[in-house]
Image (spheres, helix red, strand yellow):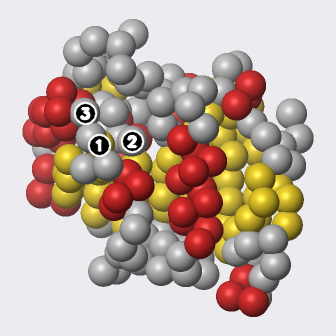
Amino acid sequence: MPIRVIAGSAKGRRLKLVPGDTTRPVMDRVKEALFSILGRGIVGSRFLDLFAGTGSVGIEALSRGASQAVFIELDRRAVQTIHENLALAGLADRAIVRRTDVFQFLKHPPVQPFDYIYVAPPQYKGLWLETLRLLDADPGWTPPGVTIIVQIDPDEAQSVQLARLESYDQRRYGNTLLWFFAPRAGSSEGSEAPQEPSL
């Protein structure tokens, strides 16, 4: 399945896939829907792409005007593919690529806050839930104004107890679910509340 940049400065550029079957590229229609939802808010933003795979989501953010994107990926072949795709799109100057484990990365708060955090881990391993709980536990990752987007198969969705974050939207596109979270008002003193998927 070929992937491409849909809009912005790198519109139409074809991106490479990661060799093998360790990653699952997001479909163009899902990516297009995502950035339609995010709208003009992406311009000038800082974007964090966790379990980045091909890097296509963070690259789309850069193409549409994000000021910086940080790509976190452990797989060596995927990291190489991200570098190649950034070069193909002409966007490497605004990107940081780190080969590291997401959970180790999230143990230390960011130097600067992110506006968007995209979470799209390998399927059926519960990694999305572990990631969401780590983000929820550290206010440094979830300041007011941040948007967290979880991309999972709908079959993976389950109720989750969160102290600071709350779900505010869900969109299903075939076998892909985009689940949106943001800090709840007064979340610094918030108590845990269950977040239920409404599929």
Residue at image x 62%, y 48%?
Answer: 129
CA distance separating discs 3 and 1: 6 Å
Circle number at residue 75: 3
Label 3 with label 2: CB-CB less than 8 Å:
no
- Of residue 8 and residue 146, the one placed in the foreground of this image is 146
- Amino acid on which disc 1 is placed: Glu
Position of 119 with respect to 17 (left or right) is: right
Q: Residues within 10 Å of mark 1 (few under 14, many from 20)?
A: many
Relative to 168, residue 72 above or below = above
Quadrant where the C terminus sits is: top right
Q: Does the residue at mark 3 contact the one at mark 1 (Cβ under 8 Å)?
A: yes
Q: Are marks 2 and 1 in contact (CB under 8 Å)?
A: yes
Tell whether 142 sits left or right of 90: right
Is 80 drawn above or below residue 127 in the view shown?
A: above
Q: Which residue is mark 2?
A: 51
Quadrant housing residue 96: bottom left
Q: Amino acid at mark 3?
A: Asp
Query: Which disc number belongs to residue 188?
Result: none
Tell me the CA gap for discs 2 and 1.
Answer: 5 Å
Rate crowding at label 3 as few (under 14), some (14 to 19) or many (20 or more) other CA atoms within 10 Å: some
Residue type at mark 2? Phe
Which callout, 3 or 2, points at the residue further toward the start of the chain?
2
Q: Closer to the camera, 5 or 84?
A: 84
> In the image, is 132 to the left or to the right of 154?
left
Left or right of residue 103, residue 40 in this image: right
Q: Secondary structure under badge 3?
A: loop
In the image, what residue occupies the spot 49% across and 73% down?
Answer: 141
Which residue corresponds to the image point at 79% horizontal and 40% vertical from the top-left?
Answer: 158
Q: Is residue 88 above or below residue 104?
A: above
Question: Which residue is identified by label 1?
Answer: 73
